């Protein structure tokens, strides 16, 4: 599957949307370098779309994202009445088109000096896919259409919030489907770790509570959260320590003990490794 990979921050942002219905023999306009990503969502019929040397037949319940820097054209006319939504979005951060794990094409770079240093991560959107829940997706688009023309701050914020929900669904739809039992075990493990993060925890304890072998629990968490139980617990403890550093006057040693680290030196070492800054410097910089 070809995907579009975005480095965040900055997260892709919504620009505008609309809908169209083409009758038989009508076709999508040909355009070059439109400078925005064009998300097409077909609800009825078929769109025949090309982008440079690639061609797609986008049917009801399917989506296609056209790049902002390429030539788009109608590969052929519609053979039946075709209805679709379109949505334009853009990003000020880096993005790539990824066709396999070793190839990244067409990097887009924009440098922005952040207010504070944020840890970068990536989100991946399918360039073409079948929606897992089309009706919910269509409803989000209809809600966006209701806000078209409303320039109030509240409406603009609502637009971006709805668009982020759309991104989340697209991100989920391109992920490999995970067995519901695996998700349930991983979520139970995560919940237990969150509820008991202040205490010393072992894999044996987790195994006893969930009644599964530690290795199996670890595999479940890796599939769902991308990390082992120990890695999840460490991340959660660090996030809790950040809250204590910013919102209380507790000393670093008190916070280390409060969030479950055995020693202040281990806490400081782990915090610095994860965030590239010491706990005290973090407090002084962001408080």
Image (spheres, rainbow, N blue to C red):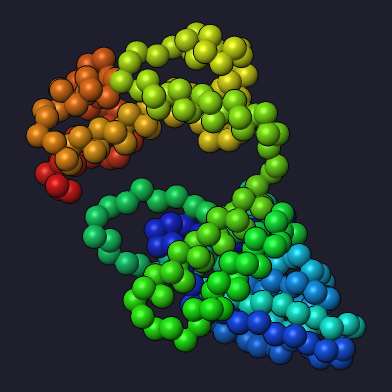
Q: Position of residue 217 (x, y in %)?
A: 58, 20
Report the quarter where the N terminus lies. bottom right
184 to 74, vertically: above or below: above
**Of 58 and 108, the residue lying toward us:** 58
Residue at the outermost right position: 79
| Residue 100 in sight in this render | yes
Q: Quadrant of residue 194?
A: top left
Q: Is residue 66 left or right of residue 264?
A: right
| Residue at position x 53%, y 35% in the image | 225
| Residue at position x 24%, y 60% in the image | 115
Q: Quadrant of residue 224?
A: top right
**Of 98 and 86, the residue lying toward us:** 86
39 to 260, vertically: above or below: below
Q: Position of residue 57 (x, y in %)?
A: 82, 72
| Residue 69 in sight in this render | no
Q: Position of residue 246 (x, y in %)?
A: 17, 41
| Residue at position x 27%, y 24% in the image | 259
Q: Quadrant of residue 128?
A: bottom right
| Residue at position x 37%, y 20% in the image | 196
Q: Is residue 264 left or right of residue 95?
A: left
């Amino acid at each position: 599957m070809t995907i579009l990979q975005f480095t965040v921050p900055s997260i892709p942002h919504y620009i505008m949307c609309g809908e169209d219905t083409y009758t038989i023999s009508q076709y999508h306009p040909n355009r070059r370098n439109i400078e925005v990503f064009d998300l097409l969502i077909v609800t009825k019929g078929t769109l025949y779309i090309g982008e440079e040397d690639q061609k797609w037949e986008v049917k009801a319940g399917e989506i296609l994202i056209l790049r902002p820097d390429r030539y788009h054209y109608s590969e052929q006319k519609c053979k039946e009445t075709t209805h679709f939504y379109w949505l334009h979005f853009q990003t000020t951060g880096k993005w790539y088109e990824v066709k396999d794990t070793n190839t990244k094409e067409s990097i887009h770079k924009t440098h922005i000096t952040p207010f504070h240093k944020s840890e970068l991560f990536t989100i991946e959107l399918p360039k073409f896919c079948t929606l897992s829940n089309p009706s919910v997706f269509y409803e989000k688009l209809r809600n966006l259409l209701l806000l078209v023309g409303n320039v109030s701050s509240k409406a603009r914020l609502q637009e971006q919030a709805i668009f982020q929900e759309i991104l989340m669904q697209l991100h989920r739809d391109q992920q490999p489907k995970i067995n519901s039992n695996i998700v349930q075990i991983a979520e139970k493990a995560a919940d237990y770790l969150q509820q008991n993060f202040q205490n010393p925890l072992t894999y044996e304890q987790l195994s006893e509570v969930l009644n599964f072998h530690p290795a199996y629990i670890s595999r479940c968490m890796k599939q769902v959260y991308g990390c082992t139980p120990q890695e999840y617990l460490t991340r959660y403890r660090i996030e809790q320590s950040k809250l204590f550093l910013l919102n209380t006057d507790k000393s670093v040693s008190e916070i280390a003990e409060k969030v479950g680290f055995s020693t202040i030196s281990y806490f400081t070492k782990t915090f610095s490794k994860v965030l590239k800054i010491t706990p005290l410097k973090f407090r002084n910089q962001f408080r």
